[in-house]
Image (cartoon, helix red, strand yellow):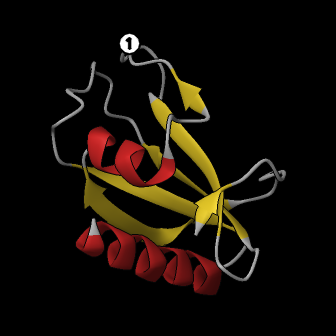
Amino acid sequence: MKKSNSSTNGTSFHDVTIKASVNDLISILGEPTVQDNTGDDKVNFEWDCETEDGDVFTIYDWKEYKKIDENEIIEFHIGAHSKSVSNVALEELLKVLKNN
């Protein structure tokens, strides 16, 4: 799993989430693809990524509507083209977070 420059158009939420902090995700993925931590929009942080098999997915906070403390554990959505890709992304993220 890694950050990606590939298009994530058409990805959507399939009820797969991960609890982490912004800093946890930065430590494994680098800086977010989108970052506007004002709380004014539905999303403050988003990463465009791909699985080890090259399937694209996104990780993003959803409707926090507040400025997020970057050490706060919150629920991030995982968006992909299918639920199976979302689940693979979750497994890969959890594995890397555990080893980090």
Residue 55 locus on image (x, y percent) = 74, 74
Residue 57 locus on image (x, y percent) = 65, 62
Residue visible at 38% across and 65% down?
17
Mark 1 is surrounded, within 10 Å at the Cα level, by few (under 14), some (14 to 19) or many (20 or more) other residues, namely: few
Q: Quadrant of the N terminus?
A: bottom right
Q: Quadrant of the C terminus?
A: bottom left
**Extreme residue toward the left, this view:** 72
Residue visible at 53% across and 74% down?
89
**Extreme residue toward the front, this view:** 100
Residue 37 locus on image (x, y percent) = 39, 19
From the viewer's perspective, tell me whether residue 62 is left or right of residue 31: left
Give, as a three-letter code, the residue at label 1.
Thr
Taking depth in this image into account, of 18 and 31 the one nearest to the observer is 31
Residue visible at 17% across and 36% down?
71
Does 46 appear above or below 29?
Answer: above
SS for callout 1: loop
Give the residue pinned by disc 1. 38
From the viewer's perspective, tell me whether residue 17 is left or right of residue 41: left
